[in-house]
Image (spheres, rainbow, N blue to C red):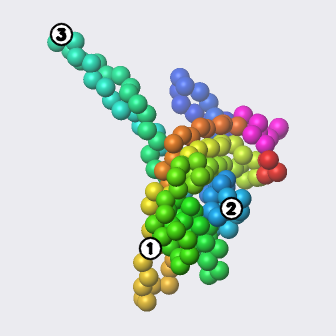
C-alpha cells in the first residue's frame, strides 16, 4: 500500500507536504474605528479575505535590434474583505467610525464632509495570520498604512434568506510577510494565540 512518503516526483523528491488550508486564518486590525483600539467585533465577523497581491511596473529597454525588460516601481493591489453584517450592528459601527475618521459622511453629528488633515490620523494596520489548526501562526502578513477605499453595503431581497454582507476594499501602502519555520514536533517560530 502506498504511503504519503512513497509519493513524489521523479528527479525532484519524495513525499507530500501538508498544504495550508483556506479556512484556517484570523485577521486583526490596529488603529481602526473611533478610538482605534477596539475593532474586535469586525475581526469576528470577517468571513472572506484576500491575501496581499503585488505587481511591478514593467520598464522596456531598447537596444539596437533587441529589447529587454526590468522591474520598475511596485504596487500593492487593494485587498478585498467580506464581512457578515450582524444584527447588533457592531461590525458596521467600526466601519462607520473608520469612514468618519477618513471623511465625515455618515451620521448626524460632526464636521459634515470634513476630511482628516493627514493620513496618519485615519490610517490603520491589518494583520492576517494563517493558522495550523492548533492556533499557531504559520504565515503572517502585516499591512501598513491601510484605509477603506470602498465600502459596499450590498443588496437586500425579499426572495433571498442569505446572510447580508458588507464588502470592503482596503488600500494599503506597504505589506510584509513572515513565514513560520513549521516543525511538527516543535510548533512554529511565529508564536501562538497569546502573542
Lower sequence index among marks 1 and 3:
3
Give the residue at mark 3: 64
- How many angstroms separate mark 3 from mark 2 (CA)? 60 Å
Give the residue at mark 2: 35
Q: Residue furthest left?
A: 65
Residue 181 in percent (x, y) is at 72, 34
- Identify the element where label 3 is drawn: loop
Name the residue: 56% across, 61% down. Answer: 101
Give the residue at mark 1: 154
Above or below: residue 2 compared with residue 45: above
Residue 27 in percent (x, y) is at 64, 55
- For residue 176, which quarter of the picture? top right
Query: Dot 2: few (<14), some (14–19), or many (≥20) neighbours within 10 Å?
Result: few
What segment carries the magenta color? 181-191
- Identify the element where label 2 is drawn: loop
Name the residue: 53% across, 78% down. Answer: 108
Lower sequence index among marks 3 and 2:
2
Amino acid at each position: 500500500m502506498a504511503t504519503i512518503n512513497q509519493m513524489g516526483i521523479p528527479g525532484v523528491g519524495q513525499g507530500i507536504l501538508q498544504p495550508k488550508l483556506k479556512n484556517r486564518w484570523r485577521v486583526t486590525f490596529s488603529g481602526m474605528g473611533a478610538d482605534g483600539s477596539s475593532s474586535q467585533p469586525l475581526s469576528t465577523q470577517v468571513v472572506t479575505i484576500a491575501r496581499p497581491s503585488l505587481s511591478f511596473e514593467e520598464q522596456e529597454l531598447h537596444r539596437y535590434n533587441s529589447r529587454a525588460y526590468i522591474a520598475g516601481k511596485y504596487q500593492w493591489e487593494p485587498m478585498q474583505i467580506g464581512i457578515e453584517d450582524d444584527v447588533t450592528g457592531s461590525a458596521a459601527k467600526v466601519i462607520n467610525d473608520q469612514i468618519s475618521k477618513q471623511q465625515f459622511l455618515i451620521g448626524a453629528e460632526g464636521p459634515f464632509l470634513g476630511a482628516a488633515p493627514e493620513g496618519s490620523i485615519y490610517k490603520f494596520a491589518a494583520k492576517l495570520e494563517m493558522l495550523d489548526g492548533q492556533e499557531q501562526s504559520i504565515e503572517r502578513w502585516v499591512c501598513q498604512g491601510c484605509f477603506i477605499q470602498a465600502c459596499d453595503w450590498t443588496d437586500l431581497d425579499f426572495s433571498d434568506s442569505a446572510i447580508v454582507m458588507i464588502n470592503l476594499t482596503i488600500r494599503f501602502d506597504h505589506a510584509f510577510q513572515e513565514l513560520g519555520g513549521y516543525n511538527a514536533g516543535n510548533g512554529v517560530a511565529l508564536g501562538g494565540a497569546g502573542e
